């Protein structure tokens, strides 16, 4: 193999070269990429010549695909491809993809379609490094906690900022209500690493009030988003980023003055999260079987 891995920061991110992701990958290439993903959490590839079909084919090397989203529409003719388009909303909040369902995607791919002349970076944070950063008393507390994740919550957006279009987008996003309880500390099924599994869809600690929950979630989230734990990826044309959705969070920076920005997302179906005592996540409300199969850990 001529595949090369070039580390980008000490804690997260690497660039992969020497592989053509527009063609079927050899088994040893898939293994090397999976191993690099386990170590670096987020990988950047040259995606010149890759289209929607090719992006889906690349993602399938790592498992079955989800559909585009549980409630949001796909690209026309490509039910597994979600358009991440600034005109349809901006994900400028820290989150892990679709954690409000029982088995969120194990991995996500983002491919640049239209990039602004400046800004529009994607930030990706290492949740395992965040867990290791916790002081021992806080780590022991986090180990015992479960959080309820939901797609239907108060986004605290001022009324004057919500026009008819934004109201319609929010209504579509919440057209099916999902609530799922996940361990705050998730054990990665391949590496055994522990990571903070929180982010924007985590709205309440099981057994605590909303106010108490917010204090604890904000405290834990502050460790995830420490600058040392973050890859700040400035998009270029024809790039693809693959990141491990089980142990990262990400954020789309809204710093491009409303200029066009469009990525295409394809996600790989995942397993049910497991906490440090071996207990699996459980669904409270909402059936996502139309969106994703439940897979064994891989």
Image (tube, rainbow, N blue to C red):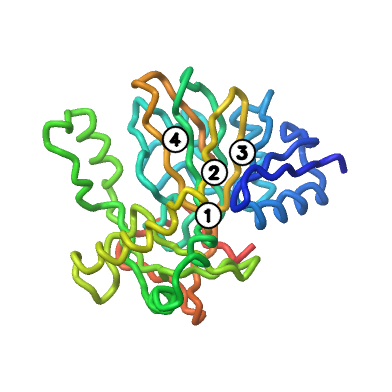
**Residue bearing mark 4:** 74
Position of 92 with respect to 153 (left or right) is: right
In the image shown, does 275 or 133 lie closer to the viewer?
A: 133
Position of 200 with respect to 116 (left or right) is: left
Against 268, residue 129 (above or below) is below
**Residue bearing mark 3:** 56
Q: Are marks 1 and 2 in contact (CB under 8 Å)?
A: yes
Separation of disc 1 and disc 2 at Cα?
8 Å
Q: Are marks 3 and 2 in contact (CB under 8 Å)?
A: no
- Point out the tag, 1 or 2, that comes first from the N-terminus: 1
Q: Which residue is drawn at the image coordinates 75% and 44% (left, top)?
A: 5
Q: What kind of element bears circle 3?
A: helix
In the image shown, does 51 or 248 lie closer to the viewer?
A: 248
Separation of disc 1 and disc 3 at Cα?
25 Å
Q: What kind of element bears circle 2?
A: strand
**Residue bearing mark 2:** 231
Q: Do the residues labelled 1 and 3 touch (CB within 8 Å)?
A: no
- Point out the tag, 4 or 1, that comes first from the N-terminus: 4
């Amino acid at each position: 193999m001529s595949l090369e891995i070039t580390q980008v920061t000490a804690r997260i991110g690497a660039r992969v070269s020497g592989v053509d992701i527009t063609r079927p990958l050899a088994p040893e290439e898939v293994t090397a990429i999976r191993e690099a993903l386990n170590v670096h959490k987020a990988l950047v590839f040259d995606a010149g010549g890759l289209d929607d079909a090719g992006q889906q084919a690349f993602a399938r090397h790592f498992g079955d695909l989800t559909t585009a989203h549980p409630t949001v529409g796909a690209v026309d003719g490509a039910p597994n491809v979600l358009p991440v388009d600034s005109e349809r909303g901006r994900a400028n909040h820290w989150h892990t993809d679709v954690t409000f369902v029982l088995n969120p995607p194990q991995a996500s791919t983002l491919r640049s379609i239209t990039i602004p002349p400046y800004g529009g970076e994607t930030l990706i944070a290492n949740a395992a490094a965040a867990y290791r950063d916790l002081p021992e008393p806080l780590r022991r507390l986090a180990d015992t906690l479960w959080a309820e994740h939901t797609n239907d919550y108060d986004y605290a957006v001022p009324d004057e900022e919500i026009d008819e279009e934004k109201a319609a987008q929010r209504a579509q996003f919440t057209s099916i209500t999902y609530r799922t309880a996940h361990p705050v500390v998730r054990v990665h099924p391949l590496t055994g690493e522990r990571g903070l599994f929180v982010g924007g869809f985590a709205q309440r600690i099981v057994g605590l009030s909303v106010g108490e929950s917010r204090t604890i979630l904000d405290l834990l989230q502050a460790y995830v988003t420490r600058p040392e734990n973050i890859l700040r990826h400035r998009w270029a044309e024809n790039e693809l980023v693959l990141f491990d959705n089980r142990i990262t969070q990400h954020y789309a920076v809204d710093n491009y003055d409303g200029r066009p920005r469009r990525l295409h997302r394809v996600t790989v179906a995942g397993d049910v999260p497991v906490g440090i005592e071996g207990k699996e996540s459980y669904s409270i409300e909402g059936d996502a079987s139309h969106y994703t199969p439940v897979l064994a850990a891989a």
